[in-house]
Image (cartoon, rainbow, N blue to C red):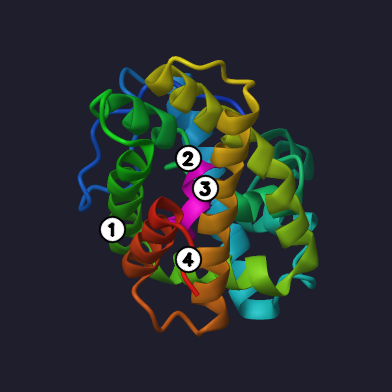
Amino acid sequence: MSDNDVMTAARTKTPEPAAAPTDPAAGPAVPARMGLRERKKLKTRVAIRDATYRLIREQGYEATTVEQIAEAAEVSPSTVFRYFPTKEDIVLTDEYDPLLEVELRARPADEPIVESLRHVLRRAVRLGFTEEPEVSRLRTTLMVEVPAVRSRMLESMSVTGRMLCRVIAERTGRDADDLEVRTFSMALIGALTEASAYWAEHDHEDDLGDLVDRTLDMLSAGFRA
C-alpha cells in the first residue's frame, strides 16, 4: 500500500465493493464476492502497475513511456489509459485504496476521528511494508522528486477529503459541507502527505508508523514551539 506513502492508501477515484479482511501474508486485499470479470480487471491493473515500477527502477520515471509500460504488461496503450488516466495515476493508486473508507466506518462511532485514522493508517503501513516495502519507498521518492507526480497527488487529495468529510460528518452529526469539517479533513490529509514527504526526504530512515503517530499527535494537541 500506499502506506503508503501514508495517504496514497486513501486515494481512489471510484469506491469499490467492500473488501474482504486482509492477511498481511496474503497480499493485496480482494473485494468480497469478486466475479471473473472483476478478477481479470484486477489482474490487469496489477500487471500494469508492476511493469511501471520495474521500468522506473531500470530507467527512471521520465524515460518510462506508456507505450513501454503497455508492452511490458502485455496490453495495449489504450488499455493502460482505460485503467489509469495518466502515468502518474499508475504510481499513485494501489489495491489498498478502497479499504480506507471501509475501515474507518468499521471503527467505533464514538472514537475520535484522529484515533480512528491512527488505527487504520498504522495497519496500512504495516500491510504495505509486509507486501512491497521497496514500492512504498519508490512511490514516496517519486512524490518528492517528480513534479508531475506531486501535482497529480495534490489534485487527488480533494477526493480523499470528501471521503473524510462524510465520515467526520456522520461521527459528529454535522453537515459534510461545514467549513470546520472541510478544513479539518484537509488539514489531516495535508499533514499526513507532508509526513510521507518528510520520510522520503530523509532517505526513509525513520519508521513511517512513528511519523504517522507524531503527525496525528501534533494535530490533536496543537503545535508547540
Amino acid on which the number 3 mark rests in the picture:
Leu
Judge whether 132 appears above or below 78 on screen.
below
State left or right for residue 159 relative to residue 169: right
Q: Which mark is residue 135?
A: 4
Amino acid on which the number 2 mark rests in the picture:
Asp
Q: Which residue is mark 2?
A: 97
**Residue visible at 65% across and 29% down in the picture:** 179
Disc 2 crowd rating (10 Å Cα; few below 14, some 14-19, many 20+) is many
Residue 73 is at least partly visible in this image = no
Q: Which residue is mark 1?
A: 126
- Give the SS element for disc 2: loop
Q: Earlier in the sequence, mark 1 or mark 2?
A: 2
Disc 1 crowd rating (10 Å Cα; few below 14, some 14-19, many 20+) is some
Query: Mark 3 near mark 4, Cβ–Cβ under 8 Å?
Result: no
Q: Which residues are magenta?
A: 1-11
**Residue visible at 57% across and 20% down in the picture:** 176
Q: Earlier in the sequence, mark 3 or mark 2?
A: 2
Q: Earlier in the sequence, mark 3 or mark 4?
A: 4
Query: Mark 3 near mark 2, Cβ–Cβ under 8 Å?
Result: no
Residue 25 image point, x, y percent: 20, 53
Judge whether 111 appears above or below 157 on screen.
above
Front tag of 3 and 4:
3
Q: Which mark is residue 188?
A: 3
Q: Dividing the picture into quarters, in which one does residue 21 lie? A: top left
Q: CA distance from mark 3 to mark 4?
A: 24 Å
Residue 173 image point, x, y percent: 44, 15
Q: Earlier in the sequence, mark 2 or mark 4?
A: 2
- Give the SS element for disc 4: helix
State left or right for residue 115 relative to residue 48: left
Which sits in the foreground, 44 or 220? 220
